Image (cartoon, rainbow, N blue to C red):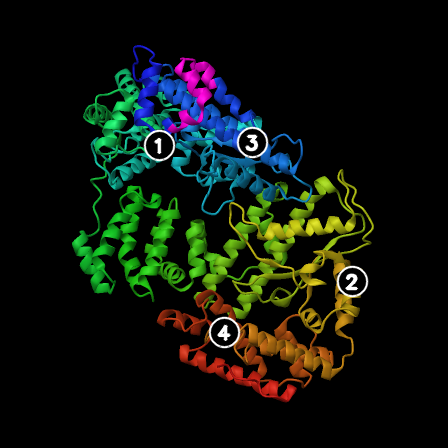
Amino acid sequence: MALDHRTVDWDGALRRARAHAPFLARALDRQAELAGLLARGEGEAALDWARAQANETSALATGLRRERLGLATALAIGDLAGAFDLTRVMAELSSLADRALDRAITSVIQRRVEGAAPAGMIALALGKHGAGELNYSSDIDPILLYHPATLPRRSSDEPGEAAQRYARGIVAMLSDQNADGYVFRVDLRLRPASEVSPLAISCDAALTHYESSALAWERAAFIRARAAAGDIGAGTDFLAAIRPFVWRSSLDYGAIDDIRRLTQRIRAHHSGPREPGPGFNVKTGRGGIREVEFFAQTHQLIHGGRVPSLRVRGTRQALDALASAGCITAEDATVLGEAYDRLRVVEHRLQMVEDRQTHSLPAGDALDSVAQLEGLSGGAALVDELMAITNRVAERYDTLIEEEDRTHIALPTAPDALSRQLAQLGFDDPQALAERIVGWRDGRYRALRSTAALDAFDAVLPALLEALAEADAPNRALLRWEALLASASSAINLFRLLEARPALLDQLVAVLSLAPTLAEELGRRPELLDTLIDQTALDLPGDVEALAARMEAGDASENYERALDRIRIVTGEVRFALGLQLIEAVHDPLDIAAALSRTAEAALLVAQRAATREFARVNGTIPDSELLVLGLGRLGGGALTHASDLDIIYLFTGASGTESDGRRPLGATLYYNRLAQRVSAALSVPTAQGALYEVDTRLRPQGAQGPLAVTLESFAHYQRKDAWTWEHMALTRARALTGSQAAREMLTAVIDEVLAQKRDPDVLRADLLKMRAEIATHKPAKGVLDAKLLRGGLVDLEFLVHFLQLRDRKGLAPDLSLAIRELVEAGLLPETIVPAHHLMTRLLVATRLMAPDLAKPPKSAARALAKSCQCADFKELLDKFSAARHEVARCWRDVFDEELERDE
């Protein structure tokens, strides 16, 4: 219940504000007209004056800040005077947030699309904002969603790109601090997968998240969610769609345990005083605001699926509804409700002082000042009152927490004994590590919260620690293990499998210790652990069409956002499995490189199909014309690494003067350039499932200065007449990846014709040697394992091969291994160059995953690297690498009649 002001005292409120709240004193001085209204006791007129400030200037950002300052001032004085109760104050502040969000959304959209309504852009309010319970200095925590089909945007903007631009604009308009202050601090971290997701999420992606991978705290957050701004109708529809996620028909005590444990952790890690006094936090402290909120929300989650009357947003409403439904006693509802109101009033007083988002009681004179602002005699009176309130709240919340008793679960060893065991295994600082391991069991990790999960984990823990102790960097491997535990929602099946199949444990530790790229990906996507369990994880994937079929399975082809997610899911699973195969030396790195290339080709093929369907919905198609993708470099040669970009050129068939047949027709050149942009974005822009590939199109005619996509005829003319030598070198590894069979054959014929041109050997030799010298100058080798850039490495070998291909017009195969074999058969290279190329390619593929810094790796990594390259040990690998480089240097001397310079 709000503070009971017997009479309305405007003069007293103004005196206390000027004496004890510097922020309010400055605000009153700055807004003389408003101060006059308040002095005359005209509270409603003061609120009207404040609301009007947003329209007093043409600059919306300025107007919103002035409106916020006016409302904060008027509400504070009215609150102190007893004219506005707590419910009115919170509702006015929440309505301001709604108006500000809505106007910001409309403004940022209309900057790009004049006069457009905010269709398809949704702001969901959560927490106190959703409940209509904002405080004076609250952040707002909206979730921004968008509908790609209805979002207003320029024709050149992709929906996702437009939504991110709008989201950034909304945050800046409301949060940026200037001479007029700020409107609201905007925190977007409650969105799905906020660590990796864009600021605005498509409705389909968000729905998929809440249906499949959301956490219990997200259910609790959506108890108070509502569509607050933007496309309210679409937002309301979205909330209706996820209602089964929030309100489950069965009693879900498992999820409720998550909420209880969260509060236990908050209490355990709360560093301030446990009782009211200086430094006590009225929000997160024992018996504070959050415990009242969690008490209500926990009971709502338990019973709300079966009792619709409990599906209310406000905390007081929820407590009253729970009492009416018999879920809690009427006494508890009253005690907790009155405590909540009083704690919120105190919270407001703390924030009125300097307009800061603080919840902690100050010390000394500052505490007395807060108390006197409230109308109390001094700080001691305020502390005494809070002591009684928080004790009543804590007593009731304690009963909720104590329903979960974990005392029957014992650690496998006592901490001291565990420390001794870790010391015997060779871990650094075993005592600190023992405390960390004990901490794994305290409920912080969702995967370790059930008795069954803990039992399964206990069984595998000794073997896990022994395996981690053998890693080159045990502490780093432990950090990656903890990241995995933090991300996994359930791991009981994995723990049991690790116990039953020790080889799986070895594989997991190998990933954590030997392959940082895979370990990081596993931390982001713990569901990749299923790859370890799958018996087919060590099999090479099928052909391009088989992989594409996996990516297009289910309803992925019916929804563009889901199609992009599905591409990323399948690609991630395959790349992870191939990485595991590489570090386990199950397959030749040459075969893994080919499989990585097939996977990328499939992703490109499916992305182009999906982007073309989506693009055609608005822009139609161009008859007798199609988009082609030409792969170059390692993609064209069919031998990627885990770190490879995709080097591609976009081309299209047909005449450039034709036009598409959609409701927004485009000329062919513009049509295919925009479609090419969309294909690149489909492969490279992060979605809820993460990023995929970096796409490099700089090898196109005229490079970055030229259009992204050109006609096949234009490409042929450029290559015949204007291309540089290095561009023809690139064509030696070019391969048509997408398009109809007829179109691919036309493109291949153009490439064959260009490569068959007769060239001046001296000019060709001079061009190649000049280019290689420039590369050596500007891109030196990065380490002793740099199979690419060290002299005598793969770059030198590729230059050697390209020279012979262009000079003699032989060995013109995109696959470098096949090209070298054909050059050997033609007598242009010795047979000994074949194993040299294979060894260095294996080393390139393996180091990109296991030694990305290209420096000499530590013992275990060196052993794994040697094994994957089919060598007995690391010394043999280095010896063979040196021999391979000497073989390339010998061929270089024979072909170019000059010595290959040595690395320094």
Residue 313, visible in the rendered structure: no
Three-letter code for the amino acid on which mark 3 is drawn? Leu
Three-letter code for the amino acid on which mark 1 is drawn? Glu
Identify residue for label 2.
746
Instruction: Verify whether residue 45 appears in magenta.
Output: yes
Q: Position of residue 678 (x, y in %)?
A: 65, 49
Quadrant assignment, res 533: bottom left
Identify residue for label 3.
60
The residues tagged by marks 3 and 4 sit, at their Cα atoms, a distance apart of 56 Å
Q: Position of residue 874 (x, y in %)?
A: 41, 77
Q: Nearer the viewer, mark 3 or mark 4?
A: 3
Q: Earlier in the sequence, mark 3 or mark 4?
A: 3
The residues tagged by marks 1 and 2 sit, at their Cα atoms, a distance apart of 72 Å
Q: Earlier in the sequence, mark 2 or mark 4?
A: 2
* 129 over 194 or under it: above or below: above
Q: Earlier in the sequence, mark 3 or mark 2?
A: 3
Q: Residues within 10 Å of mark 3 (few under 14, many from 20)?
A: some
The magenta span reads 26-47
Say which element carries label 2. Answer: helix
Say which element carries label 3. Answer: helix
Q: Earlier in the sequence, mark 1 or mark 2?
A: 1
Three-letter code for the amino acid on which mark 2 is drawn? Met
Instruction: Verify whether residue 225 appears in magenta.
Output: no
Say which element carries label 1. Answer: loop
Q: Residues within 10 Å of mark 4 (few under 14, many from 20)?
A: many
Q: Nearer the viewer, mark 3 or mark 2?
A: 3
Identify residue for label 4.
786
